[in-house]
Amino acid sequence: CDAVLVTTPPIFPILPAIALAKLRRAKLILDVRDIWSDELVHFGGIRESSAPVRVFRWIEWLGYRCSDLVCCTTQSLVDTVLARGAARNNTRVYPNGADMELFKPKDERCNAIHSFAALGDKFVVMYCGLFGLKHDLDSLIEAAALLRDQDDVVIALAGNGVAKRAMEKRISELEINNVVFLGELPLDAIPNAITRADVCFAGEHNDDYQKKLISVKLFEYMACEKPVIGAVVGESERIIEESMGGVVVRAQDPQAIVEAVLSLKKDPARLKEMGIAGRRFVQANYSRGDWARKFERWLVELGEER
């Protein structure tokens, strides 16, 4: 092989990737999606000074030092890995994005999700993705409770994950019936689900680590010409504001989510404008196809060096 590509998290594959690259005298590319040691501190309850975190940080450092190219999804992550040992001339931003051919506006007449009885002709606020601990779906459930008197508004959740059981328990405690689980959907059905939405939701916890990340779902929502309510911070907040493809509200604030839903519900023209602006922004800046071609050029350059 001419190159070895390893993606993190998790971090343990970094070690065999380093060994293989040295054995084959190949170039090593480290693709950093998230920083696992930081994730464990912020969401796993592990202390910064603990032995496991120190070991994980050492493996990460070794990966930075041994790699010929380190790619990170945001500039904030680039700044972090540079501070932790990566070489500046080897480190680049390689962001998440959307497949513009897959994620695009669909014809609602052909949309199977549209006939889902519980959605009917209601105003649909949709979350589509992983039900993870860091996505602050708790605030969306609390917002649903505050919207219980809005008979024409429904919260639709497409996906699955570790937080689902807690979400179902909270929905039962609140005795609300305006939340619908659509289940896990195959990739090619996700754009159809997003098309059925009137507005889409993305949430994060308000902490320093989350400020460094951008959720992939933002790009997929906007590529489908759907406006976004973002209860987000940092890099995700910047994306929504630069794109003009949605509104940013305070993170972890159910009342702010409710106010955004009711405001946008009254203004269909604004929803349409945001949707068009969002897709235009993603097409220009975060097309997966465009970035894949850039990444290919980087690999060719590394191959020529070898």
Image (cartoon, rainbow, N blue to C red):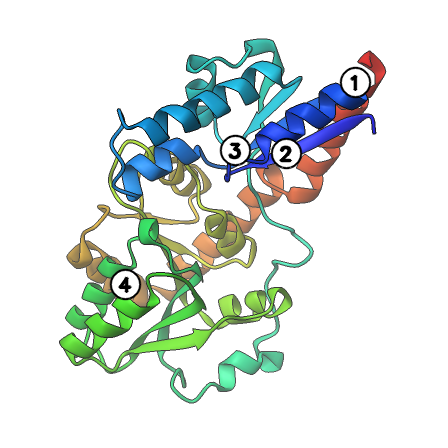
Q: Which residue is mark 2?
A: 6
Looking at the rendered structure, the kind of residue marked 2 is Val
Residue at the extreme bottom of the image, as rendered: 117
Question: Which comes sooner in the sequence, label 1 or label 2?
Answer: 2
**Residue that mark 3 sits on:** 73
In percent of width and height, residue 283 lies at 61, 44
- Residue at which label 4 appears: 261
- Residue 179 lies, with reference to residue 269, above or below; the image says below
* Inter-mark Cα distance, 3 to 1: 27 Å
Q: Is residue 118 above or below residue 305?
A: below
Callout 1: few (<14), some (14-19), or many (20+) C-alpha neighbours within 10 Å?
Answer: some
* Residue type, mark 1 in image: Arg
Name which of mark 3 and mark 4 comes first in the sequence. 3
Mark 1 and mark 4 residues within 8 Å of each other at the beta carbon: no
Q: Kindly identify the residue that appears in the image at 33 percent across and 33 percent down.
A: 209
Q: Residue at (77%, 27%) from the top-left corner?
A: 3
Q: Residues within 10 Å of mark 4 (few under 14, many from 20)?
A: many
Asked if one can make out residue 273 in the rendered structure from this viewpoint, the answer is yes
Separation of marks 2 and 4 at Cα, in angstroms = 41 Å
Q: Earlier in the sequence, mark 2 or mark 4?
A: 2
Helix, strand or loop at mark 3:
loop
Q: Position of residue 301 (x, y in %)?
A: 79, 18
User: Could you say which disc has been placed on residue 25 in the image?
Assistant: 1
Q: CA distance from mark 1 to mark 2?
A: 15 Å
